[in-house]
Image (cartoon, rainbow, N blue to C red):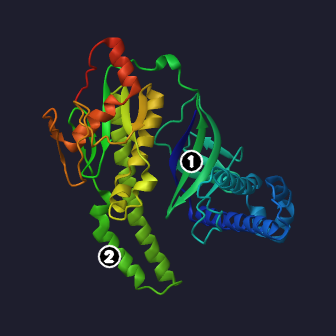
């Protein structure tokens, strides 16, 4: 399996200038290669391959001396990235999905470059990262990379005014025998009022990081709107707005990491609804709140942590989970404003989300198999 380890970099002023220049050069190469592919198809109905464009790198370096300062494999990875984007574009066309033709990268829309094989050395003792053609950079190794892991690639990423090194590490696949026996299972209903409701009635409050920072964000955005477009002051203000967004993003990510770790450590089986979030955010009344909650990110974090811990994560159909009674299974229609489930057939009265979480757990095939083999209801500890 592959995992990505992300560490903060503290480059010097000259190293930051080199990073920025490399990003400019990579963006220029990307846009040039994209224009070549676009023109070849429009004029000759011919697809340009990755191999063809790689063979032209030597001539491109002669035409643009700045490309000579960039590591050769970094330039090759730019073309490989574009080739992968086109393959995904054609794959979506074949499947009949919304394709989305590859777009040219704007001035501040290209924020990373990758050493795909070599050109980087990580010094654990000195806490330095040595990059070919750049030098040694201070790196904060806040957690160790497993000794059995093999570092495959190193990506330098710009996040507003911070720089990060992202290492793609190949790790041994988990031993199938390390899979936990299902002793404790939990059904999870995601929502907006409460971020999570568990089938034992426990709830996790929704922090609403974006909502809490909206006032500050609005102030910074109004300041930006008063600046002249294209001016240095407007660019500086853009950076301030981006820092606010970064803080919100980091708060949400930190909360989801801690919450997913708590779930994985507490339960042997975690059952989520299978949601189509991209369709849900088309509702403009709820789009901001759904994006702020970050359900998809929480599920992804839970999934990869569970894989390492031997915990099972299962996704079940979300169809009518809020409408069905968790006791008798009868359909009890409700509007979105109805927050209490009252079953006229069996008399069950529960919070709407609590009822939904129980229904989610009862739809789990792993839960039903474990319950039938044990012959009794599986215990669920409070979260």
> Which percent across, then down, holds residue 183?
32, 19
Q: Which residue is mark 1?
A: 166
Q: How many residues crowd around disc 2 within 10 Å: few (fewer than 14), some, or many (20 or more)?
A: few
Say which of marks 1 and 2 sits in front.
Answer: 2
Give the residue at x 24% y 26%. 381
| Relative side of 11 to 37, left or right | left
* Residue 76 visible here: yes
- Foreground pick, 195 / 178: 195
Q: Quadrant of residue 362?
A: top left
Q: Is residue 112 above or below residue 191?
A: below
Residue 71 image position (x, y, % from top left): 74, 55
**SS class, disc 1:** strand
Mark drawn on residue 219:
2
Decide: few, some or many residues near mark 1? Use Cα within 10 Å; few <14, some 14-19, many ≥20: some
Is residue 371 toward the left or the right of residue 117 in the image?
A: left
Q: Secondary structure at mark 2?
A: helix
Vertical position of residue 107 compared to residue 230: above or below: above
Among the two numbered marks 1 and 2 on one chain, the one whose residue lies closer to the N terminus: 1
Query: Which residue sits at x=60%, y=42%?
Result: 168
Spatial separation of the CA atoms under disc 1 and disc 2? 33 Å
Q: Horizontal placement of 33 versus 219: left or right?
A: right
Quarter holding the C terminus is: top left
């Amino acid at each position: 399996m592959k995992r990505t380890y992300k560490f903060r970099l503290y480059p010097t002023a000259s190293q930051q200038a080199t990073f920025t220049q490399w990003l400019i050069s990579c963006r220029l190469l990307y846009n040039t290669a994209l224009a070549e592919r676009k023109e070849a198809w429009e004029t000759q109905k011919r697809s340009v391959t990755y191999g063809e464009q790689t063979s032209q790198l030597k001539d491109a370096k002669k035409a643009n001396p700045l490309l000579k300062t960039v590591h050769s494999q970094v330039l090759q990875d730019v073309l490989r990235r574009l080739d992968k984007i086109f393959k995904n574009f054609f794959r979506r066309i074949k499947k009949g999905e919304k394709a989305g033709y590859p777009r040219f990268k704007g001035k501040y829309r290209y924020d990373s470059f990758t050493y795909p094989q070599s050109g980087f050395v990580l010094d654990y003792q000195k806490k330095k990262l040595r990059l070919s053609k750049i030098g040694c950079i201070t790196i904060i190794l806040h957690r160790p990379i497993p000794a059995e892991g093999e570092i495959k690639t190193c990506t330098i990423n710009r996040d507003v005014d911070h720089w990060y090194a992202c290492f793609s590490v190949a790790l041994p696949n988990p031993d199938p025998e390390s899979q936990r026996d299902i002793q404790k299972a939990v059904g999870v209903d995601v929502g907006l009022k409460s971020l999570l409701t568990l089938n034992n009635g426990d709830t996790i409050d929704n922090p609403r990081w974006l909502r809490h920072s909206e006032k500050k964000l609005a102030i910074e955005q109004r300041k930006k709107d008063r600046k002249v477009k294209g001016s240095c002051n407007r660019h500086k203000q853009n950076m301030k707005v981006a820092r606010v967004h970064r803080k919100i993003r980091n708060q949400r990510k930190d909360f989801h990491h801690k919450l997913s770790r708590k779930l994985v450590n507490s339960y042997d089986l975690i059952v989520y609804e299978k949601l189509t979030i991209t369709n849900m955010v088309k509702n403009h009344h709820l789009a901001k709140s759904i994006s702020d909650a970050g359900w998809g990110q929480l599920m992804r974090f839970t999934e990869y942590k569970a894989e390492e811990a031997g915990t099972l994560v299962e996704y079940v159909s979300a169809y009518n989970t809020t409408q069905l009674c968790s006791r008798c299974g009868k359909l009890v229609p409700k509007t979105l404003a109805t927050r209490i489930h009252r079953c006229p057939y069996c008399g069950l009265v529960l919070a709407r989300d609590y009822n939904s979480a129980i229904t989610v757990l009862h739809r789990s095939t792993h839960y039903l198999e474990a319950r039938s083999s044990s012959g009794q209801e599986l215990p669920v500890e409070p979260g």
